[in-house]
């Protein structure tokens, strides 16, 4: 599957793509001819990122990852 990073596009195009609603379709035209269509599906929504960890939680996660890697090594 091809992937396109919106950060690599001009802002106007990135805003157009990011603003598509569920079920909305975008027609790609080149020299007056339709060359493709993009449709926004409901399942394509990006989940909201999780809130950042507190310093204590972050330290616990780092320690747990370190402990697990040591156990895997030996």
Image: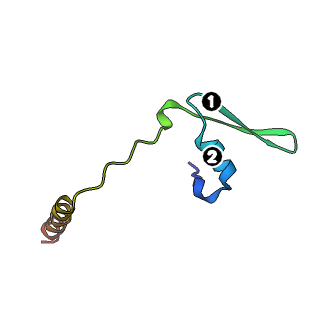
Where is mark 2, residue-wise? 15
Residue at image x 66%, y 53%?
11
Query: Is 17 or 44 nearer to us in this picture?
Result: 17
Q: Report how far apart the C-alphas of labels 2 and 1 lie in the structure.
A: 14 Å
> Image point 20% across, 65% down: which residue?
62
In the rendered image of this protein, does residue 59 appear above or below residue 6?
below
Q: Secondary structure at mark 1?
A: loop
Tell me: 33 left or right of 1.
right
Q: Residue furthest front?
A: 54
The residue labelled by disc 1 is 24
- Which element type, helix, strand or loop, lies under badge 2? helix
Q: Position of residue 73 (x, y in %)?
A: 17, 71
In this rendering, the answer to whether 62 lies above or below 32 is below
Q: Residues within 10 Å of mark 1 (few under 14, many from 20)?
A: few
Extreme residue toward the top, this view: 23
Badge 2 density bin: few <14, some 14–19, many ≥20, Cα 10 Å: few
Q: Position of residue 54 (x, y in %)?
A: 22, 58
Q: Earlier in the sequence, mark 2 or mark 1?
A: 2
């Amino acid at each position: 599957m091809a992937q396109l990073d919106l950060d690599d596009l001009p802002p106007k195009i990135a805003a157009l793509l990011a603003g598509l609603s569920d079920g909305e379709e975008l027609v790609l035209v080149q020299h007056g001819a339709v060359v493709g269509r993009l449709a926004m599906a409901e399942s394509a929504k990006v989940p909201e990122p999780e809130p950042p960890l507190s310093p204590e939680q972050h330290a616990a996660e780092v320690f747990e990852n370190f402990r697990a890697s040591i156990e895997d090594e030996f």
